[in-house]
């Protein structure tokens, strides 16, 4: 399934939002300082659908609202098998690299900051994750979404190979 086929429309589902980071930007002019805010937001239905967005405004609440609207435009469907990822997967975006590994039931989400928000929004309850490289929340979110977008479940692999589901598991 290509990335185009994995995209989802936001009108079909109920989404919950999580704030990943807020950044205050100061512009110094002759008249004084002006502050503006940028907010990184992740939205998901906690059932395999997730998206991220960036909102910028003069006020925090407006920046968050713009981020949510932006996130609803970039939703993707992710395979979740028994509350974890189907297989080990690497993701990369700019200087950020992430590793996702499946975990047994009861492990919980072992991930930090920006990765945790994305994984919880998609509905993953058990996963081992490691962020390597850059800790910039923008890049970590995008690297995590890259890893999630490249996941494939057994049904998808069987369909792509043109074989039965039993043959995927038994070789």
Image (cartoon, helix red, strand yellow):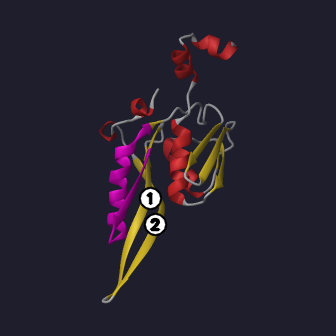
Badge 2 marks a residue whose secondary structure is strand
Vertical side of 136 occupied by 29: above or below: below
The answer to which quarter of the image holds residue 164 is top right
Vertical side of 92 occupied by 168: above or below: above
Q: Which residue is mark 2?
A: 22
The answer to which quarter of the image holds residue 31 is bottom left
At x 69%, y 36%, the residue is 104
Instruction: Please state the horizontal and vertical placement of residue 90, each as a whole percent of the image.
Output: 62, 41
Distance from Cα at disc 2 to Cα at disc 1 = 7 Å
Vertical side of 140 occupied by 151: above or below: above
- The answer to whether the residues at label 2 and label 1 have Cβ atoms under 8 Å apart is yes
Q: Which residue is mark 1?
A: 40
Badge 1 marks a residue whose secondary structure is strand
Asked if residue 62 lies in the magenta stretch, the reply is yes
The answer to which of marks 2 and 1 sits earlier in the sequence is: 2
Magenta residues span 51-76
Residue in front for this viewpoint, 3 or 87: 3
Asked if residue 95 lies in the magenta stretch, the reply is no
């Amino acid at each position: 399934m290509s990335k185009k086929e994995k995209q989802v429309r936001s009108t079909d589902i109920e989404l919950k939002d999580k704030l990943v980071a807020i950044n205050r930007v100061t512009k110094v002019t002759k008249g004084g300082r002006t502050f503006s805010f940028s907010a990184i937001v992740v939205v998901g239905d906690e059932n395999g659908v997730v998206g991220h967005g960036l909102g910028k405004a003069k006020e925090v609440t407006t920046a968050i609202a713009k981020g949510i609207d932006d996130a609803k435009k970039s939703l993707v469907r992710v395979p979740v098998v028994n509350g974890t990822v189907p297989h080990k997967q690497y993701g990369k975006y700019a200087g950020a690299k992430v590793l996702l590994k499946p975990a047994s039931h009861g492990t919980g989400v072992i991930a930090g900051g920006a990765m945790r928000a994305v994984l919880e929004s998609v509905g993953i309850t058990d996963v081992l994750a490691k962020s390597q490289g850059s800790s910039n929340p923008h890049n970590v979110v995008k690297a995590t979404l890259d890893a999630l977008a490249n996941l494939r479940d057994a049904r998808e692999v069987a369909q792509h190979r043109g074989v039965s589901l039993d043959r995927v598991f038994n070789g």
